[in-house]
Image: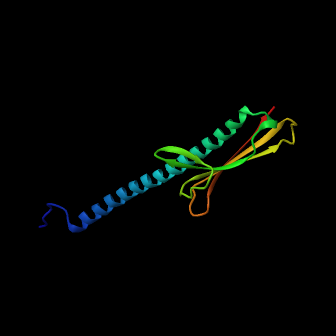
Amino acid sequence: MKNSRGFTLVEALLAMAIVLFVVVSILSGFTQQMVSNRYVGAKNIAISLAEAKIEDYLKFPASQMPVGSVDYVVEQNRKLVVSTSDPDREDQYRRTTVITPSTDFAAMNVIRVTVEYGKHGDRYPFRVVLTSQRGG
């Protein structure tokens, strides 16, 4: 007659393998979500930086708008710091503003703000571009 108390070694190993598979799957999902949140957060900051630069130009008539510029934004102590020179840091933002006269309206300028982000080495793999007509 067989003793039916307890689990066999094979049953215990199979149960551990199933539990391990479930735990690894859950942890993988969390890791992917954290990476996704980081990229979405960086994109939101890039959009905000582009919008802020366009808003800066609202106070100028087309004839008095400052020329375009390039600046760099880095995060320091949970604050964004703007610099006109390249601090050469990973994950910094490069914001380029180009002002051109509008071809459609005589007293208007086209403002194009490009924010590149996710710097690794010399590359900025991600980009947000906002364009607006301002002046008057």
Q: Where residue 68 sits in the image (x, y, percent)?
A: 73, 46
* Tally of numbered discs: 0
> Residue 60 occupies which quadrant of the picture?
top right
Quadrant for the N terminus, please.
bottom left
Q: Where residue 133 sits in the image (x, y, percent)?
A: 78, 38
- Is residue 80 in sight in this rendering? yes
> Residue 119 occupies which quadrant of the picture?
bottom right
Quadrant for the C terminus, please.
top right
> Residue 25 occupies which quadrant of the picture?
bottom left
Residue at 42% from the left image edge and 52% from the top image edge: 30
Q: In this view, does 63 lie above or below 23?
A: above
Residue at 58% from the left image edge and 46% from the top image edge: 82
Q: Where residue 11 sits in the image (x, y, percent)?
A: 25, 64
- Is residue 96 in sight in this rendering? no
Residue at 65% from the left image edge and 52% from the top image edge: 127
Residue at 85% from the left image edge and 35% from the top image edge: 107
Q: In this view, does 55 lie above or below 123?
A: above
State the residue in front, 81 or 9.
81
Q: Is residue 96 above or below residue 135?
A: below
State the residue in front, 55 or 1.
55
State the residue in front, 63 or 112.
63
